[in-house]
Amino acid sequence: MTKFLLIPLGLFLIFAQIPFFGSPQEKPEEPESPVKGWWEVKYFSVSPTQYSKTGKGIIKAESAGSRSSLYKVVGEKERNLPILAWGWKVSNVVRSAIETRKDRFDAAARVMVVFGKEGPFKRIGKGEPSGLKIEYIWATRLPKGHLFDHPGETNCKIFVLESGEGKAGQWVYFTRNVQKDFKMAFGMEPLPVAAIGIQTDTDHSNEMVTAYYSEPILRK
């Protein structure tokens, strides 16, 4: 008669979790960023904006009631360069946005510069970088040239570079002296640049916007 070996249920469950060949199970890798060289910051309970690379140095952002950011580390040799250059194009503005209200502050296009003594960041993908921040936005209501405090964040100043839909569908290019803008915004000598980010968000308005960015670069 064939004999069967009976294994207690608890011991069987332990054995079942041991991988074959005796090798330890590897931890799953973190999901890759949608754009190489950048890391994505998502926000609790909000669907992320869809970012993708569409050409050499061009990032596409598609927002439909969504919000997330892309950030990249600034290299040690670039941290004290004064000029930030980029271009952007939007399909439309966020028509119901009100930039001075925390619960209505959406923007069709946003470029963010984070300043800090510590850096460059050695680890990425761990949330937003900390430090003093300037945002350059394509606004809906506020006029070009307006400078104001972020309605929902501390240590963040906002410059309106474009406003309204007069140039929607067109590429608009900028060069900003971030050191001069820092002095104007914070009234102190500029800190080194630690990170640069972009964001297209419509989570408050639940509207739809498509934006394109030429990757911002620091130069002399």
Image (spheres, rainbow, N blue to C red):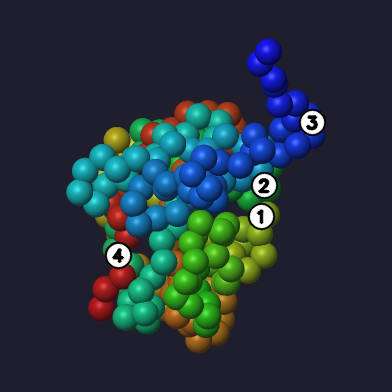
Residue 204, position in %: x, y? 62, 36
Within 10 Å of the Cα at label 1, are there few (<14), some (14-19), or many (20+) other Cα atoms?
Answer: some
The three-letter code of the residue at mark 4 reads: Ile
Residue 143, position in %: x, y? 48, 51
* Distance of label 3 from label 4 (alpha carbons): 63 Å
Earlier sequence position, callout 2 versus callout 1 = 2
Q: Are marks 2 and 1 in contact (CB under 8 Å)?
A: yes
Front: mark 3 or 4: 3
* Secondary structure state at the residue bearing disc 2: loop
Name the one closer to the observer, 26 or 96.
Answer: 26
Name the one closer to the observer, 53 or 90.
Answer: 53
The three-letter code of the residue at mark 3 reads: Pro
* Distance of label 1 from label 4 (alpha carbons): 27 Å
The three-letter code of the residue at mark 2 reads: Arg
Within 10 Å of the Cα at label 4, are there few (<14), some (14-19), or many (20+) other Cα atoms?
Answer: some
Earlier sequence position, callout 3 versus callout 4 = 3
Q: Are marks 1 and 3 in contact (CB under 8 Å)?
A: no
Taking 50 as reference, is 135 above or below it? below
Q: Residue at x 32, y 80 (%)?
A: 77
Earlier sequence position, callout 3 versus callout 2 = 3
